Amino acid sequence: MNGTRTLRVNRWGNGLGIRLPKDFAEKEGITETSRVEVSITDKGLMITRAKEPRKHIPLSERLKGWDSKPYELLDEDREWLNMKSVGDEVEW
């Protein structure tokens, strides 16, 4: 596969567009719904595949397999829990 192609720029609505050759798109994993980033560099225009947005995962799915057993308290936590009121603290 040749690494360079000359492409024609065409009007696309109010903007301009190019068509990516199939072999270029396949090599880069770009499909019809992919997102790309376009940037201007010292060498010219650069088109790269954009990172896919993070898929929303509901909290219930994220917590599957989470061990909900209480964790062992550290000594300083036990001391804090066993402290008696010394002033006007409000107890819950």
Image: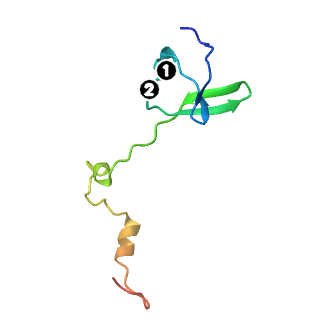
Q: How is the image coloured?
A: rainbow
Residue that sits furthest to the bottom in the current view: 88
Q: Residues within 10 Å of mark 2 (few under 14, many from 20)?
A: few
Mark 1 or mark 2: name the one nearer the start of the chain: 1
> What residue is shown at x 31% (from left), y 60% (from top)?
72
Q: Is residue 31 found left or right of 5 in the rendered image?
A: left
Q: Nearer the viewer, residue 87 or 57?
A: 57
Q: Nearer the viewer, residue 12 or 69?
A: 12
6 versus 68 height, above or below:
above
> What residue is shown at x 38% (from left), y 47% (from top)?
56
Q: Nearer the viewer, residue 22 or 70?
A: 22
> What residue is shown at x 43% (from left), y 43% (from top)?
54
Looking at the rendered structure, the secondary structure element under dot 2 is loop
Which residue is identified by label 1?
25
Q: Is residue 25 found left or right of 85 in the rendered image?
A: right
CA gap between label 1 and label 2 equals 7 Å
Amino acid type for the residue under numbered disc 1: Ala
Amino acid type for the residue under numbered disc 2: Thr
Q: For residue 86, which quarter of the picture?
A: bottom left
